[in-house]
Amino acid sequence: MSGGMLSLMAAVILIGFWAFVWALGLLGLRTARNKYTGPALPSPLSARPASSVPGVTIIRPLCGLDSNMYSTLESVMRQDYPKFEVLFAVQDPDDEALPVVRMVMEKYPEVSSRIISNPEKVGVNPKVNNLMAPFAEAAYDLLWVVDVTIAVQPSVLGRLVSAFMASPTRAFDVDDVEAAPLLADDVRKPPSAGDVGLVHQVPYAVVCERTWGSLIEQAYLNSTHAKMYLAINAVAIESCVVGKSNLYSRASIASLTTPSPTLRQRPDPPTGLAGFAPFLAEDNMLALSLWHELGLKHALSPDVALDFLSALSVRQYVARRARWIRVRKHMTFAATLLEPLTESVVAGVYGSWALARLIGADRAAVFTLHMAAWLAVDLGVRNALATRVRAVGPQTSLPVFVAAWAMRELLALPVWLYGMSGSDVVWRGRKYTIVGSGEAI
């Protein structure tokens, strides 16, 4: 086969992939506009008596001090929902977070809340270790696990529960007042195959301490990450979940078998949450198991999870992104290998080359138009997600956001190459090595 024919075939394949990447990006933009720009109506569950709604245990796993901690913790105490409790989980009884927790609890004595301190360690993942005791001690089956950096608006919990209960296989409608008794904890059954088994939120980053690292991270989360996250969940052919804010059934989690090859070799491998302790990306693994093992669907909440970022240097930003690339490459190698082709600069390079090869288009002009259109889509996603939360936290100006976005796009390929070059990661000051199964040692 001649070189000309090979380049022609390559151009056809690349232009097809370029169109596919653009289709995903536009789907992400459409989903953002459809889901987050309209009014967020309160859930009918919020107005019902406590006896006729599912109770929810809100779990906040804590370790040390984090950015804007008082406000993020306070946000779950202000939920407009008739039946919930809040558990603040720590592993160290002298954790620095506890004075802040006590101030929040004192301000809201009417909310059922308590501190759980338990040093139990079932694996390498500190978050799983911290969740073991509150999972066991929760008063309700529905668990809402919210990371410490996340803040939510008062009406969020009602909408999360409505999304969880609104499954086509259920015999009742959550908006039907006459069906209210069927939602109560003493008669409600855990979700079964075909039902919604997990409700999650797309993160929307807020920067209080402005450093270039945190601004680049904000640009990534509020544009590229959100766009692809929304698109993949809209297609819904595979699980795609970030564990910043997840609502699920304790009974569902307890029934899961461990995906860990190491733990499966034991005579009596652990089930439930403990079976996910070998993985740093326990959120992704739990979601995958709910999806594949139990056949439970995922629902995306119409509310963003406000993620308050701490001050990051550019070096810390690179280390954070490389860490998760190193985790992902051992879990979904093929998808991680293709990631650079979905990034703006690389896509612009091969897309402009392919168009030049096929129709003689001017490569520089195509690349310039491609980058301008990509920025416009990303700004559209960012603006749509910000519709209901514009007054929260300091606002990043458009010129600063665009500058941070440009740095993120230019760093994407070098960060990917750095991430793919190793398997060692550092998380909360501790070094781990990610092995072939995706487990950390």
Image: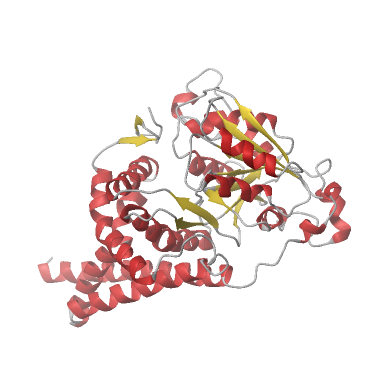
Q: Is residue 399 above or below residue 214?
A: below
- The colour scheme applied to this rendered structure is secondary structure
Q: Residue at x 22, y 70 (%)?
A: 11
Q: Quadrant of residue 21?
A: bottom left
Q: Quadrant of residue 360?
A: bottom left
Q: Nearer the viewer, residue 64 or 304?
A: 64
Q: Residue furthest right?
A: 178
Q: Is residue 381 above or below residue 330?
A: below
Q: Nearer the viewer, residue 80 or 68?
A: 68
How many discs appear? Answer: 0
Q: Residue furthest top?
A: 267
Q: Is residue 174 visible?
A: no
Q: Residue 417, position in %: x, y? A: 23, 49
Q: Residue at x 30, y 50 (%)?
A: 337
On-image quarter of the N terminus: bottom left
Q: Residue 33, position in %: x, y? A: 53, 72
On-image quarter of the C terminus: top left
Q: Could you tell whether 441 is left or right of 93 in the image? A: left
Q: Residue 422, position in %: x, y? A: 26, 38
Q: Could you tell whether 177 is left or right of 62 in the image? A: right
Q: Residue at x 47, y 71 (%)?
A: 383
Q: Residue 190, position in %: x, y? A: 72, 42
Q: Is residue 181 visible?
A: yes
